[in-house]
Amino acid sequence: MKEIEPIIKQFLFDGTYRESIAYGAGHINDTYRLTFQKGKETNRYILQKMNPGIAEDMDLLMDNIERVTKHIKGKNRQQTPMLIPTKASKNYYRTKTGECYRAFVFIEHAKSYDEAQSEHHMRECGRILGMFEKDLMDFTFDPKYVEMTKNFHDTRYRYEKLMQAVETDAFGRVKEAVDEIRFFIQRQELYGQLLTLVERERIPVRATHNDLRINNILIDSREQKGAALIDLDTVMPGLAAYDYGDAIRSAAKRVYYKDGKIESVEFLPHLAAAFTKGYLEEAREILTKEEIETLPLGIRTMSLELGMRYLTDYLNGDVYFKKNKDGKNLENARREIAFTKQVEQYQKELEQMVVRDQTSK
Ligand code: ATP
Ligand code: MG
């Protein structure tokens, strides 16, 4: 990894540099794991080349990550990826050509999984999310950062964007997606429900992760316990229902393929239940009753929102999700639709699940 050696020299790593390897399967950033030796000690770090698309203002984003991780570390209850400063005392390094790099302490014995491994795994993921939201309960964001990130999860806005793409039909693809478009139109009254509750001050806005796929939760491989929540680029004011919903959307399902195409999607309520249990074990004390009742709606909202983003991108010619060409965006939108339909059938059960868990302890 010769090409990153000049970058490595810019950070205050502890010890003598030994090696670097490409690490993880990140879709957004390029990640490396670095090894340093200090006497008998081996120190490891994560170095990431950041995708410039992740923020309008990198200083604001990195200051937010630094503040969030320090806050969590101060609570001393869970691990968190602490930043390594540069030799110029900055929290990231910008090259002369404008590429940005940052470095974290490597969390040892920790592994992330793309898919749910077991009920135990889901429960641990839920616990880590609950602990994270609890630790950040008294966190205050920089108002400039809040301004930069507003409307991140605005489902109504996502729907408007879809309707604009339908109207424009720039690639003549509307005819391929009539049923899918209809599906999202039929559910339009759902998109504002959570936001309306916020506007009426019925549920609070709190510090949330906002990209809660379970591969952003590290599990300690020695005792199979939740270790840390990583990928903190989107920590911002949000709703508990978003993180809860996204975690279940991303993990409590099985997708069946036939000839490389999605054939069906199965929602797995036992995994959703395990996640709910772990999450509420930690977070119940900070969530309001009404907030807990909104959690199941979060699952559908996140799946619908993501489905609309895929479909919009398909109609706009695959410009945002660049890898999703050749119909992949449409295929992904269909997966979210199939998942939403399944979840709709379980709505009652999910509502009972969160209420039951609320009173069972
Ligand atoms: P994605 O888009 O897939 O979420 P990303 O490009 O945003 O990925 P990260 O999720 O931050 O990148 O990191 C990629 C992988 O590197 C993680 O899945 C995890 O396995 C590993 N990783 C990142 N940070 C750490 C850390 N501090 N300690 C241990 N492992 C880490
Ligand atoms: Mg990640």
Image: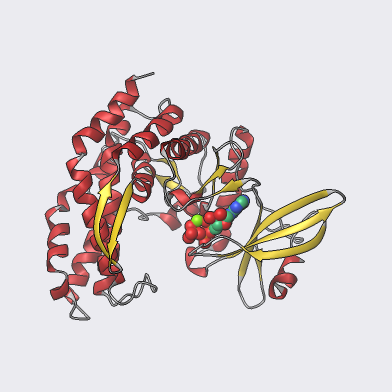
> Looking at the image, which is closer to me, 335 or 82?
335
Q: Where the C terminus falls, by quadrant?
A: top left
**Quadrant assignment for ligand 1:** bottom right
Place of residue 40 in the rendered image (x, y in percent of width and height, measured from the top left): 85, 48
Q: Residue furthest right?
A: 39
Q: How many marks?
A: 0
Q: Residue at x 52, y 50 (%)?
A: 112
The residue furthest bottom is 171
Query: In front: 209, or 120?
Result: 120
Image quarter hosting the N terminus: bottom right
| Residue drawn where x is 24% and y is 73% of the image | 315
Q: Is residue 203 above or below residue 254?
A: above
Q: Judge whether 180 appears above or below 137 on screen.
A: below
Q: Residue furthest front?
A: 259
Is 18 situated above or below 225? below
Residue 109: tell me if it is visible.
yes
Q: How is the image coloured?
A: secondary structure
Residue 177: which quarter of the image? bottom left
Q: On screen, 214 above or below 58?
A: above
Identify the residue shown where x is 37% and y is 51%.
250
Spot occupied by residue 60 in the image (x, y as percentages of width and height) = 55, 57
- Quarter of the image where one finds residue 10: bottom right
Compared across the picture, whether 38 is left or right of 101 comes to right
- Residue 224 position in % (x across, y down): 55, 38
Q: Position of residue 17 (x, y in %)?
A: 80, 62
Task: Determine whether, in the image, residue 69 is placed left or right of residue 120.
Answer: right
Q: Residue at x 63, y 45 (%)?
A: 109
Q: Is residue 55 visible?
A: no
